[in-house]
Image: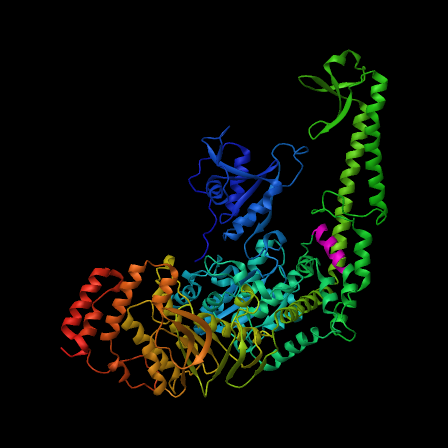
Amino acid sequence: MSAPAAARAPASSPPARTPLMRQYLEIKREHPDAFVFFRLGDFYEMFFEDARRGAALLGLTLTSRNKQDAEPIPMCGVPWHQRDAYVAKLLKLGHKVAVCDQLEDPAQARGLVSRGVTEVLTPGSVTGDGFLEPGANNYLASLWPVPRGLGVALIDVSTAEVKLAEIDWADAAAFLGRSRVAEWVLPVLEQLPGALAARLESALSGLPGARAPLPVGEFAGLERTERWGDSAGALDGLPDAAAAVAAALGYLDRVQGAAALPRPRIERWSDDSALRYDAATARHLELFHPQPGGEPVHTLWHHVNLCATAPGARRLRAWLERPLARPSEIAARLDVIDAWRRPDSGHATFRDALRGLPDLERLTARLAAARATPRDLGALRDALGRLPAIAAALPDGRPARAALAVPPRLHERLRLALTDEPPPGSRDGGVIRAGHDALRDELHALAHSGKRWIAELESGERARTGIPSLKVGYNRVFGYYLEVTRAHLAKVPADYERRQTLTTAERYVTPALKDKEVEVLSAEERLKAREHELFVALRDETARDVAALLAAADTLASLDAEAALAEAATRYGWVRPVVDDSDGLEFRALRHAVVERLLPAGEFVPNDVSLSAGGRQILLLTGPNMGGKSTYLRQIAIAVLLAQAGSFVPAADARVGRVDRLFTRVGAADRLGAGQSTFLVEMSETADILRGATSRSLVLLDELGRGTSTYDGLALAWAVTEFLHAGAGPRPRTLFATHYHELTGLAGRLPRLANVQVAVREQGDHVVFLHRIAEGAADRSYGIHVARLAGLPPVVIARAREVLRELEAERTVDQLEGVAPRETPQLGLFEAAPHPLEQELARIDPDRLAPLEALNLLAEWRRRWGGGAGP
């Protein structure tokens, strides 16, 4: 669901009589889809509908402006120095903000202060650190739909990364769902053919992020990418992605007011180079975000992100979001991590040297786009000063050392030019170090000698006039002045010229004071202008080394991510997996990467896994609630994902036949806002699995069919199992955890299906959960035991036992066991005419059935068809 566009200035707004309001409305007309932050003194104000909605979204007080206007005008505002914090909130909610600043000093303005939009900030185009999450990319996604699929450009403006892909419609929703997108650039749906518009809308359904619709004509050709020079060759053979890039660049150029992405880092993505999984799988496995009600410590990311820098964290996250698919590439990454674990690797020294390092990647991207501030250049200087020590921490012979050898002259240039703590802006002075520029030093001396003269004037005038309370002051309206309290007015000399009367004092100037003021202020303004000029020249000169800086930043990010995975392997006792082209999946003593971290040391029970597409293709897992079935499924999925990301895994031994797609249907969730029940979500995700799985895939199913009636659920689970096993079907490696014990009978009919169970030990009326996976099928789920542990009243538990005995006495699955398995991928279950009981079941809506009605129906059916007899 896309975020709403920002409020538009209502056409029916009352005509404003003041020049200020006319100025505001003219600017608002130029930016109707953005919240306009209008600088007024020490505040940024919003007016009209912007104010109403802004106050509600940001928790501000809504007031009104009505001094000379026809009727009250709603308004709200934020202090100028807190602007970014409030803008960040609006961006996170998916809105656009146009920042309108004062373009001249109000003290020197004649009439209305000139104002103009200096920045347009959108969720996917921001580059400032205050608007971004340090450890994650912030993508703007541009989409161009064609009959065969989507051309996609994922652009992180803050790091100058561009990812290009052309994907089929069958994979579009999964691809877009797992991409971290803050803003979508897409063609106006009304200008597309109906079928394409519907497909695009379906692929985006439910995905967060602001939307920026553009005319179809902007998705055209390579003209906009020619400025990239040789880098534009990365678009060869990708015409649909090129169209998406062209539209994205045009949009970014307008938003940023300059040519965007002058030096991009372009990467072509293809499906066969990565292990693919969708957003549902990431959610089920809690890879990056906990389930509702959970905590960050429950996520895999919390435990593997041991990076020392933000670029390293972004790189590691990218590896987990797109694990590798080629065994040779996986082995190469594992070799590097192995090397970090050697005693002579300098691992600890290197990680210590990295800590606190500024974000060289984002600093360089802002430098390349001419958006770096003095503070950015100061951080860049500090980062460059630390590179030699970081490189020295690497073992001799590491190729990365060469990439970190940024020319020393760059650091020296910044060190000599910048002050120790440069300010955030370049127009207010304090940027350039003394001794760097002779003219700057001359202006500085002139301005400060004049200030010293003015400071000394106070003591001199006190002595000359005999007025002990006389003081020198300054304000923007009158400039420098001499203030005399009323008690001493009789002592005021004749050369004093009155400028202002206060309740308790008078303010004066002298000709000498005004002359010195002009000299001082002129020198200060010229000093600020000179420092700004020198800063821009320094920034442009530094930008010539962007290629070397980006190479160093890229190398540091990879080194940090590799060292973090090595640290995780050592700290957690993980082992190196073997990833090959076989169809097997073998783990010995596998553990859950997260759950074991949350338990006391040694309490987690490891288990083995053995699967292959040509042998034990499907493991049907039965056993009690709370026995650990879901944990077992999740730990396998996480281990495969870690292995193909090039990480060590939590096991005693691991061999992974490469997986092309990872599917999970684990846990229950609904999307009520989208009108989707738990069962509909479950079936939708299952349908995606059945459509997309191959013999290279890994499928993990947990309690399929539990969201509907028992017989419907059992029938669906039965048919899905047959489909996954069928010779003409996908035949993926599959683990299926279920409480439908009737399915265990399939092991005698489906040769590649094996039963495994979670072992328990019964002790009278109690059970002990062993959390150990054993061969064979379980015959009970022990649900009543779990209910007793949960604290249900004893009378309820006793009654449940009675009902269970009656149901077990009457229940029969003779018909189900007589159904022959199908060897073609069909989802049918019964061939015979339906039993009258089935017809009764089909007419019932379980969601509308009261418990008493259900018991009455059960009694009636037992009377009519007791013992499973026919009608």
The quarter of the picture where the C terminus appears is: bottom left
> What residue is rendered at 68% in x and 59% in y?
359
Residue 375 is a magenta residue? yes
Image-based side of 810 in relation to 332, left or right: left
Residue 373 sits above or below residue 443 on the image? below
Task: Looking at the picture, tell me which residue is in the foreground, 26 or 368.
Answer: 368
**Location of residue 200 in the rendering, given as x and y in whole percent from the top left corner:** 43, 66
Furthest residue toward top: 490
Look at the image and name its color scheme.
Answer: rainbow
Q: Which residues are magenta?
A: 373-384
Residue 485 sits above or below residue 72 on the image? above
**Location of residue 408 in the rendering, given as x and y in whole percent from the top left corner:** 81, 62
Task: Looking at the picture, tell me which residue is in the foreground, 559 or 500.
Answer: 559
Residue 426 sits above or below residue 111 on the image? below
The chief SS type of the magenta part is helix
Res. 641 in view: yes
> What residue is rendered at 75% in x and 66% in y?
349
Furthest residue toward front: 764
Residue 861: quadrant of the picture = bottom left
**Location of residue 664 in the rendering, given as x and y in whole percent from the top left corner:** 44, 72
